[in-house]
Image (cartoon, helix red, strand yellow):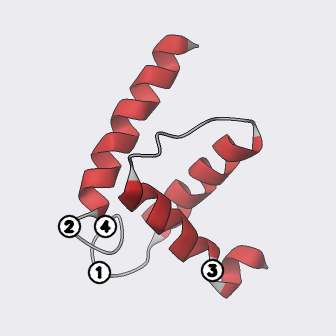
Amino acid sequence: MPRIRAAANKRLAWVDKLLGLRPFVAGDQFSIADITLYVTIDFGGLVGEKYDPSLKNRAAFHEKVKALPSASA
């Protein structure tokens, strides 16, 4: 499990950098890529995964998508 967690954290750091350059994973438009990332991050939190607090763009993205009406439906 530590190896999987390290790989996931590496990918999340990459996504954090990406989200610092644009509003959504695939560019300027909300897409299935954003839904996939949101659900993955949300599920991780539900099962007790702790995310690196320095990944501010990832955290802001999660909050932005969480605020969408479709996320709470």
Horizontal arrangement in the rendering, residue 21 relative to residue 11 (left or right) = left
The residue positioned 39% from the left and 57% from the top of the image is: 56
Residue annotated with mark 1: 28
Does label 2 or label 3 sit earlier along the sequence? Answer: 2
Horizontal arrangement in the rendering, residue 8 relative to residue 17 (left or right) = right
Residue annotated with mark 4: 26
Please say if 24 is above or below 4.
below
Q: Quadrant of residue 8?
A: top left
Give the label on residue 67, or none. 3
Does label 2 or label 4 sit earlier along the sequence? Answer: 2
Question: Circle 2 — which element?
Answer: loop
Asked if labels 2 and 1 touch by Cβ distance under 8 angstroms, the answer is no
Could you tell me how far apart the alpha carbons at marks 4 and 3 are, in whole angstroms?
19 Å
The residue positioned 64% from the left and 35% from the top of the image is: 49
The residue carrying pointer 4 sits among few (fewer than 14), some (14 to 19) or many (20 or more) residues within 10 Å by Cα, namely some
Horizontal arrangement in the rendering, residue 72 relative to residue 10 (left or right) = right
